[in-house]
Image (tube, rainbow, N blue to C red):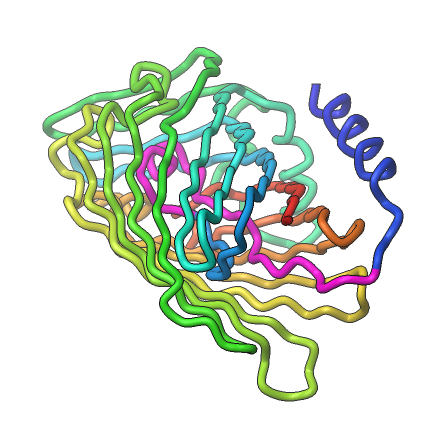
Amino acid sequence: MVGSWWRRFSLFALCISPFSQAQPIFEPLWVENLSPLAALVALPSQRSADIREGVSVSLHSDVATHFVSQADGDESVFFDGETQRHSLRLRWGVSPSWELSAVIPVTKHSGGFTDDYVNRWHDFFGMPDGGRRNVPDDELRYHFTNPTQQVGLVESVSGLGDATFEMSFMAERQTDTHISYALGYKVDTGNSDDWTGSGSSDFYGVARFSGAHRSDLPLYWHGQLGVTAVGDSDLLGAQKRDWLWFGGLSAEWHFNERWALIGQIDSHSALLNSSADALGEPAAMLSLGLRRQLNKNWAVDVSFAEDIVVESAPDIIFQASIHFRP
């Protein structure tokens, strides 16, 4: 299925590949923490602070592989499986200063197909695998227990995730600097029984900036810092933290008019008051990707994200996006 999707994606890219001289699309990588519990919370991906009138569209796909095995006293967490998420983001610039946007995800949890490739990746770089080799490949098992709850998932599921709606205001627009503020609302459209939704609504506020590097270097920067109010959830349980911070920083290096290299860091506070490091310590991910400017309106990203705070996020996330800007 994934191979077929990539073939369709490649054919689409070829069809629109003739390049027209124009300002390139400046946008950070679309990165979300897809660890089974973190993925339930409104922790928005980075995005450009710029607002353009008209409708912009991004299509994004993730394949994330998980393996976490921790136990401490009466708490234990075991995540072994794969998450695929396909998302549509619509941005409507109703004026030069105001924008409405929506993100609609479809999520699938399964045993997947990537375990053998991830094991080879670990072997090639001499990285520890945390015990991944001691369990069968490509099986699904999510399990979390503490003194007040016991939740799990062992069968493949898929469905609509929790949709997010956002209103943004452009606070400052200069030649080399954009600053915006946004309020977001995550709607309970997923299914908590299938781990595609949290079973509650979340709110967040975020400040974003984008700007060109003030030198001759062909660099462009993005960043965000925000806070999320987390709703009650049977999956997160009584140990959830009511307020979470999140933030990130992204740098684009445009080494010619068609290609850009993007490096990015994303982080957020611990999800739970838990003795398990995977849930009770802050998370951080490092991402690296390439962007191809197809023409004046279209661009394609291919990237991956790694958990630099081990077990706070998926072992690795393979990512692809296509962007349209008016």
Report the magenta residues as a range.
Answer: 21-44
Can you say whether 52 is above or below 145 in the image? below
Q: Position of residue 106 (x, y in %)?
A: 49, 24
**Is residue 101 rendered to the left or right of residue 77?**
right
Q: Position of residue 167 (x, y in %)?
A: 34, 47
Question: What residue is drawn where x is 55% and y is 28%?
Answer: 84
Viewer-proximal residue, 308 or 301?
A: 301
Can you say whether 22 is above or below 184 in the image? below
Q: Quadrant of residue 126?
A: bottom right
Viewer-proximal residue, 123 or 50?
A: 50
Can you say whether 279 is above or below 49 in the image? above
Question: What residue is drawn where x is 66% and y is 55%?
Answer: 289
Q: Is residue 227 visible?
A: yes
Q: Position of residue 45 (x, y in %)?
A: 45, 49
Residue 195 shown in magenta = no
Can you say whether 219 is above or below 150 in the image? below
The single residue placed furthest to the top in the displayed view is: 155
Q: Main secondary structure of the magenta part?
A: loop
Q: Position of residue 256 (x, y in %)?
A: 81, 69
Q: Quadrant of the N terminus?
A: top right
**Is residue 109 rendered to the left or right of residue 262?**
left
Question: What residue is drawn where x is 26% and y is 33%?
Answer: 76
